[in-house]
Amino acid sequence: MKQGKVAEESGYEEKYIGYLEHRKHTPTLTAMIEISKALKVSPVETLTRVLDLMPKFAYLENTTSTSHRDTP
């Protein structure tokens, strides 16, 4: 599904959906639920997928955390 369609279906701006996709923002629980509904996926399934993928992408968290600490 394209970002514009997800935005339209979830009630969020397309720019925000893009930020989430590129890890520029972290969604609230409400946003995660609304976006899951727009994608026609259970919010529980979305959360389960995120938890399953977290170990695979843990190195990104370490990189992101470090870069934020360096910023004044």
Image (cartoon, rainbow, N blue to C red):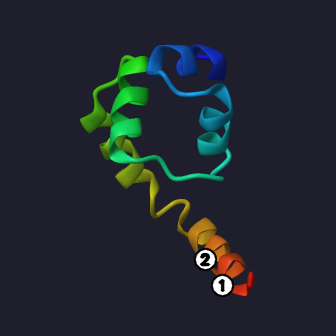
For the residue labelled by badge 2, is the local secondary structure a helix, a strand or a loop?
Answer: helix
Residue 5 placed where, x, y %? 59, 13
For the residue labelled by badge 1, is the local secondary structure a helix, a strand or a loop?
Answer: helix
Residue 35 placed where, x, y %? 43, 28
Q: Residue at x 72, y 77 (%)?
A: 67
Q: Which quarter of the picture shows residue 3?
A: top right
Which residue is denoted by mark 2 in the rendering? 65
Q: In what quadrant of the picture does the C terminus appear?
A: bottom right
Q: Residue at x 29, y 33 (%)?
A: 43
Circle 1: residue type: Arg
Q: Nearer the viewer, mark 1 or mark 2?
A: 1
Relative to 28, is 17 on the left or the right?
right
Residue 54 placed where, x, y %? 45, 59
Circle 2: residue type: Ser
Residue 58 placed where, x, y %? 53, 68
Q: Residue at x 62, y 41 (%)?
A: 21
Q: Residue at x 45, y 52 (%)?
A: 53
Query: How far is mark 1 from mark 2, CA to CA?
Result: 6 Å
Label 1: how many residues lie within 10 Å, few (<14), some (14-19) or many (20+)?
few
Relative to 26, is 23 on the left or the right?
right
Q: In what quadrant of the picture does the N terminus appear?
A: top right
Q: Are marks 1 and 2 in contact (CB under 8 Å)?
A: yes
Label 2: how many residues lie within 10 Å, few (<14), some (14-19) or many (20+)?
few
**Vertical position of residue 50 compared to residue 6: above or below:** below
Which residue is denoted by mark 1 in the rendering? 69
In terms of depth relative to the viewer, which is nearer, 67 or 52? 67
